[in-house]
Amino acid sequence: MVLDFGGQYNQLIARRVRDNRVYAEILPYTTDLDTIRKNKYKGIIFTGGPNSVFDMSSPHYSREILDLGIPVLGICYGCQLIAWMENGVVSTAPVSEYGKIELTVGKSALFDNIPEKSIVWMSHTDYISSAPEGYEVIATTPDCPCAAMQNTKKNIYAVQFHPEVTHSQYGEQILYNFLYNICGCKGEWVMDSFIDSTVEKLRNQIGDKNVILGLSGGVDSSVAAALLSKAVGKQLTCVFVDQGLMRKNEGDFVEKTFTSLFDMNFVRVNCGDIFLEKLKGVTDPEQKRKIIGTEFFNVFWNEIRKQNDKGYFAQGTIYPDCIESGKGDADVIKTHHNRVKTPEDVEFLGIIEPLADLFKDEVRKVGEKLGIPRELVWRQPFPGPGLGVRIIGEITKEKIELLQNADFVLRDEMARNGYERNMSQFFCVLPDVKTVGVMGDHRTYDNLIIIRAVTTDDFMTADWARIPYDILAKVSNRITNEVKGINRVVYDITSKPPATVEYE
Ligand code: XMP
């Protein structure tokens, strides 16, 4: 268990533990001791945090946690907290350490296979000036007399630096040593065991009741649906709202996937016409977004009301949706679009979020194991309002069709050339622009299509993708030939910032 005291690297710690094939879950520091006792953890990691242990408004924990007989590793704030709880001395460091610092280690099971001197990542203003009784200093830096300490009798270890970040040269080995040498973990956690244990948990929880899930066709809700289908089959009903703003053939593909590969009740609500009616004459991007979002939930909740069954409500919430990065406090759980608020008149037995502990790439691995087609599991991000924000100006049926057809050509050509997985996101945009062209002996006055393609790690910044000219030439040629009503194709060569990925 990773006990979260609000540090910025908490998700990363859990990630690194799982990379060692050991399951880790993150719990807020407000979790009571009984829960920890009951869950029979093999080890506990106290995370870092932005506070000072001697500020009593900062997160603390009952010192009994150190007497449970469970090995503990404290990191940064977690390290100081252990010293403070055990009556050591924590004070403001005369020199704060920030960045890469040289560490000297002594003998400890935590430092097996680590050279005496190495580089670690430090970020602290307080430090342990005197280790508690029963604790032995096992590492130092030039400005930190206690950069790590241990109490081998109680199996408690603490490090002032951050082993979880890659700047710490042997951080991975330190976590490995804690998990394997100290906690005695076996490294048996793989996606198969996650699937088996989750399916069992879901069966126990749901019993003979029903579950309803809103399926968007995105990765998270699809994987949640497949897991629930494996657990309870026909007791699961998936409601798929097709607002008519998806990519070409996408609605049919989602329907075919879930009706042919998985055992469940599948309800597709085709409501493109209602959306178009609501969007008539609307050109303001924010208003469009609002209408699409509101209408989506109106349709969804109406369908749920029709189902008339008080069962469970399932969502594809994943870990990064649950906890706002850098805040371990239970009070700051984010209201994310994946955490849907249910209307007052719709009652459920409870909410089920089977993926709430997983990171995106883990969700994809589970999806692959469950047999969801790769096309869906590796799907590029697609905005909630769909093509609605890729059509500038008023949205009409004709424009949707034009954009779907052009976008289909781009995707088809990228797939044929093996570029589908190499680029973070690519799509077509239909701006509200017509230009003059020539076709045979005639002049035309037709639509312009923009190709947008980006590479990025996190979507916060992005570079425009260098699609080879030959592929661009083919795409342009095919779009102008195959999609009636388009006579010009342009390629967007702007990075983010200053532009964004989407156009509205
Ligand atoms: P921007 O345009 O902000 O896009 O650079 C960054 C990423 O977010 C996606 N995006 C959205 N996703 N609803 C969503 O679910 C939206 O309204 C929305 N707008 C942008 C975008 O596709 C890109 O991956």
Image: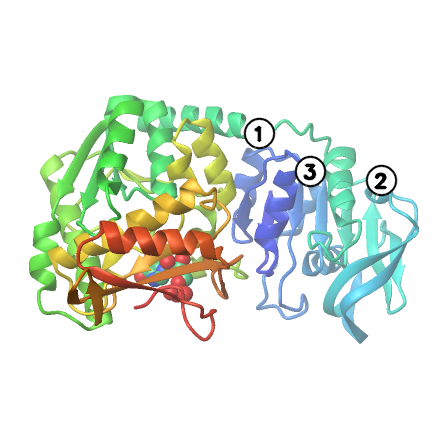
Left or right: residue 202 compared with residue 423: left
Q: Is residue 467 above or below residue 91?
A: above
**Secondary structure found at label 2:** helix
The residue labelled by disc 1 is: 190
Q: Position of residue 360 (x, y in %)?
A: 48, 45
Mark 1: secondary structure: loop
Q: From mark 1 to mark 3, how far is it between C-alphas?
A: 23 Å
Q: Nearer the viewer, residue 490 or 212?
A: 490
Report if residue 340 is visible in the image.
no
Q: Give the label on residue 70, or none.
A: 3
Q: Quadrant of residue 385?
A: bottom left
The numbered mark, 1 or 3, whose residue comes first in the sequence reads: 3
Q: Residue at x 68, y 61 (%)?
A: 77
Q: Residues within 10 Å of mark 3 (few under 14, many from 20)?
A: some
The quadrant of the picture occupied by the C terminus is bottom left
Residue under label 2, please give it: 109
Upstream in sequence: badge 1 or badge 2 = 2
Nearer the camera: disc 3 or disc 2: 2
- Total marks drawn? 3
Residue 227, by quadrant, is: top left
Q: Nearer the viewer, residue 128 or 288?
A: 288
Where is residue 411 shown, x and y percent of the image?
Answer: 36, 47
Does the beta carbon of the residue at mark 1 sit less than 8 Å from ligand 1?
no
Residue lying at 93% horizontally and 51% vertically, measured from the top left: 116
Residue shown at 92% from the left, 45% from the top: 107
Look at the numbered disc 3 and give the secondary structure of its residue: loop
Measured Cα–Cα span from mark 3 to mark 2: 16 Å
As drawn, 165 above or below 34: below
Q: What type is the residue that disc 2 sits on?
A: Ala
Q: Residues within 10 Å of mark 1 (few under 14, many from 20)?
A: some
Specify the quadrant of the image occupied by residue 288. Answer: bottom left
Task: Between label 1 and label 2, give the one nearer the viewer.
Answer: 1
